[in-house]
Structures are given as structure tokens and as C-alpha cells.
Image: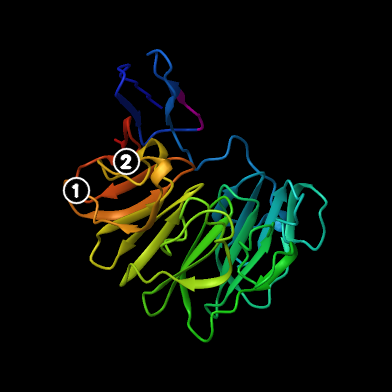
Amino acid sequence: MFCHLFETPTVAVCKLTRKTTVHDCVFELSAPRSRPVCTALIVLLASLIALPNGASAKSLSSGAGGTCILHDDDSVRCWGDNSYGQLGIGNTTAMSAPTLIDFDSTPKKIASGVGLHRCAILSDDALYCWGRNNFGQLGISSKDDKYVPTKVELGSMPVQDVSIGAFHTCAVLDDATLRCWGYNWQGQLGLGDAGSGTERTSPTEVTGITSVASVSLGQTHSCAMKEDKSVYCWGDNYYGRVGMPGLALCDQCITTPQGPLTFSTTVKEVMSGGIHSCAVLEGDDPVLGVQLPYWVDLALQ
């Protein structure tokens, strides 16, 4: 793997070749009071994980303190920290080896994030969540932690996408509407309010955006891509993570979806990290990070 950093106060570039084996690059600018601005995210394991009975991994979902694998036989195994039941195995015992989770039907997507909870979309398009629930981030109309996957009531509407923040969760439904719930101190639910007492413990429709195709949550901000490929973000704008120059920082958090964001060409996918956001663009453009004041390009070449 080749990694390169241009050390200036405003630009950092990290390039990974497609021959990458296993590596992790973390760069810091040398400017005074600088912050880490480029962490290469590699979806390769530093060592092979022994899977039971020779099973193969279909997808990997890693979040705060733990990891889950969706196998090719559609079973799910998780391991790591389990302080709040986030492994979904019925207890709070940490696991150092992949441990099977029981579901009511076949899971097809596992969502992990920077929070200590997880969610899964099942084959019947129902949504189940488990783990920490101190701000209602499980969407089950309570603040009780759940140690096993617990159904989120969304009526009969199928769930198409789900994403997890530190203490909030959002899901895209089959009618292209967006529902969010959980912590809302920075307006990350997109419901027009923010601060203490504004959390939601059950799914609430975000009326400021329609025709939603996908959603991706950061620690305390949220981004969504619409069916026309336009991107909207909201919530905590500290470091400019909402991606709209001219908007105030977190003393004036963005409580409703703002956009569309400006890109040089069509967006294929939007992704939010803890305190940054990225978009994959069509054509030869790199992955463009919208973390301000530092602009980060992550390019696969």
C-alpha cells in the first residue's frame, strides 16, 4: 500500500493502491494545533478470524467495541465488548470469539456505528435493534437496554436502509420517507428542535426531506442521499461536518436537513464517520470528504 500526505495546514491526501494487503495509516498535520485529518479506513482484517465450520463471511459490520459478521449461510456472529448487551446474545458478557445471534427470521443487513447499539434489517424487511438505549436509540418506546434483537415498530412499512450514530438511529422506509429516533442534543434527528428533553424514543418522521434513498449517521450528525442523488446533512456542524460553508458551528446546530450539497459530479454514495462525512462520486473523482476546515481526499488508485 502506498500512502501519501501533503503536509499543509489545509489539505491532506491519502492514497491507497488496489494491491493493499493489511495496513492502517493515520496522519497528522504538522501545523500548530493541528488535528488528525486523514485515517485510511481499510475493510480488511489484520489477522484471519477462525469462523465455525468453515463458514464464509458475506459482510462485516464493526462498531464501538465490537464486530459482527453476516455469513454466507445468513447467520450472524458478533464478538467484543458487551457492556450494554450490544452483542445481542442475551447477556452482558464480553466475547473474544464470534458468537451466534438468534433472529426471528433471516438477517440481510447488520448496522453498527460509533454507538453501543446495533440494528438489523431482516429478510421480511422488519427492523430489529439491541444494546444501549439510554436515550431511546433503539426506537422501542422506552429507555431500557435490550440484550437480544428487539423489533422496532414501524407499522407494515418495509425498511430499506438503517444507520447508527452515537446515540441516535435513522431508517429509510419503502415509501422513501425517513424516520429518526434517539438523542437530539445537536439536532441530529432533523426534526427542527435540539437540546435537553428533545430525544425521541420511537421512530419519528423527518418531514424536511423526501424521496430518500439512503442514510448515514455520524457521532452527532446525519446525512442522507435522495433518489435524485442529491445529498442533505444536518445536526452537529462543529468542524463543518454538515458540509455547507457559511453555516454556523455547533453553537447554532443544524436542526433540519440542509442541501443539496455541492459536488463536482453525481454522487454514488454518502458516508458519515464520527466527526466527518464523505461522498463517493461518479467517474474518476476521488472520495471527497466534507470535513471542514480541513478537506480530505481519499482516493483508490
Q: Is residue 280 magenta?
A: no
Q: Secondary structure at mark 1?
A: loop
Does label 2 or label 1 sit earlier along the sequence?
A: 1
Magenta: predominant secondary structure element?
A: loop
282 to 47, vertically: above or below: below
Q: CA distance from mark 2 to mark 1?
A: 18 Å
User: Which segment is the magenta one?
Assistant: 22-26
The image's colour scheme reads rainbow
Q: Picture coordinates of residue 260 (x, y %)? A: 24, 56
Image coordinates of residue 164 in percent, x first then y, are: 53, 56
Name the one closer to the observer, 30 or 204.
Answer: 204
The secondary element bearing badge 2 is classed as: loop
For badge 1, the amino acid type reads: Gly
Residue under label 2, please give it: 290
Q: Which quarter of the figure has residue 291?
A: top left
| In-front residue for pair 99/231 | 231
Residue 211: percent from left, percent from top: 30, 72
- The residue wearing badge 1 is 283
